Amino acid sequence: MILTTQTRKETEAIIKQAARKVFLQKGLAGARLQEIADEAGIGRTSLHYYYKNKEMLFNAVFSENFQEIKKRIPYQLEENLALKEILIQFTKEYFRNAIKNPDLDLFLLNEFCSHPELMLNLIKGHEITQFILQAFEKSIQKGELKGNAQQHFITFISVTFFPFAAKNMIQQMLQCSENDYIQYMHSREDYIVGFIHQYFNSQL
Amino acid sequence: MILTTQTRKETEAIIKQAARKVFLQKGLAGARLQEIADEAGIGRTSLHYYYKNKEMLFNAVFSENFQEIKKRIPYQLEENLALKEILIQFTKEYFRNAIKNPDLDLFLLNEFCSHPELMLNLIKGHEITQFILQAFEKSIQKGELKGNAQQHFITFISVTFFPFAAKNMIQQMLQCSENDYIQYMHSREDYIVGFIHQYFNSQL
DNA sequence: TTTGCTTTTGACATTTTTGTCAAATAGGAA
DNA sequence: TTCCTATTTGACAAAAATGTCAAAAGCAAA
């Protein structure tokens, strides 16, 4: 039997993954170091060897989640793409990454409540919000859409983002397993592309 | 100066309101009995006089929130109403109640993660989920809609429910105050009614 | 005022969770 | 093997939070 000697980095990665799982599920206050240690398959005391205390560990995990969320959001969208195309590209990119980690979405939503200052950075550093909002406004000016850009924008965010944040709720409502849910979300990607097309057509 | 003697019920109500505030903000694990007592303006020990322990208090608060959520959801919808009308009625009823307490929505979403068994009751006791889902299915059979009932259903839930759950996120994204948000949500009600009409038209 | 009840309070006990430390262990290099 | 360092472990300390209890205080009726 081969024992792979783990380097410090590897162990840290295992711990972070375990911590991530527990933190996402129970939040900072609800997470127990013992549970994280068990999940990581190490002694609780060892946690302190790698991360001085709970707060440090949380910060380490959090900043990674933070990065991961950023990666979901395509930062370069062609300036002159049609709005419809922008939305479709965005959706595809978001789904591609989010399906792997739907837990992050609810976490994110909560962080906007508990740490709004941090979240502001996420938005500010990333002008995507303004970009899409403005794209909606331009589209309205061009006569492709009627009404209010903000409402359209929120609708778009809702139909893409919410089903990830509400993963557990949806599972209960549709009375389906985790696999069913993932399956369902895969097909939702196509559904949303269709939804976007219809959204524009219905305005004509 | 008049001292109003408080009856037990009144004191309980004060405590529940204080507890509600703290629980909604910090969750069960994050809430401190001391903070709740301070918020209620009583000694911590008195909490135990009214509610044996933290869990009991949480249950009391929770079951009220529970009831409040239920009230948002119209339980009697005419069986033979057109789907379009069902959705519009549902939306109006939901908005009417939710605008007052948008905090509950995110709380609810979290509870589906942390206490799925409890949430199952909320859904089971209330056959509204199945009712609307089936209404979508019937509508598809009648040819009013194409595609998958579950997708339509989730879209509908998303555009109505999500903007409440994401209150803080939306405020940051639209860079607006709480008042602006409320204003915005009021106008969203009308927007959604229009959205529903278009949703059906676009399928023809 | 006395009595009998409800409510509040503070001191203390218990439990739970986190943090510290020194000793033990492992594993590679000399 | 021996030495050195990195890591793990278990015993313990400390802190944080909750729970208990009996005594005190409040209040209304007799």
Image: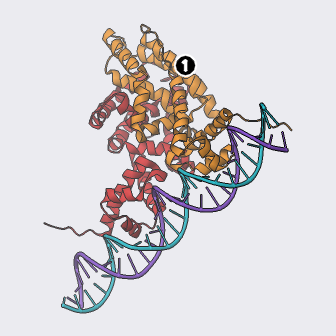
Chain colours: A red, B orange, C purple, D cyan
**Rendered location of residue A48, percent (x, y):** 41, 67
**Rendered location of residue B36, percent (x, y):** 62, 46
Q: Which residue is mark 1?
A: B92
Q: How many marks?
A: 1
Residue D27 occupies quadrant: top right
Taking A163 as reference, is A149 left or right? Answer: right
- Examine the rendered structure and indicate whether residue A202 appears above or below residue A115: above
- Nearest the camera: A77 or A12? A12
Indicate the secondary structure of the residue bearing disc 1.
Answer: helix
Tell me the residue at 66%/45% (across/down).
Answer: B39
**Rendered location of residue B136, percent (x, y):** 37, 17
Q: Residue furthest left?
A: A1
Tell me the residue at 50%/40% (across/down).
Answer: A129
**Split into 4 quadrants, where in the image is the N terminus of chain B?**
top right
Q: Amino acid at mark 1?
A: Lys
Question: Could you tell me which chain the residue with mark 1 belongs to?
Answer: B
Visible residue check, residue A77: no
At label 1, counting other C-alpha atoms closer than 10 Å, the crowd grade (few under 14, some 14-19, many 20 or more) is some
**Rendered location of residue B198, percent (x, y):** 45, 17
- Nearest the camera: B11 or A84? B11
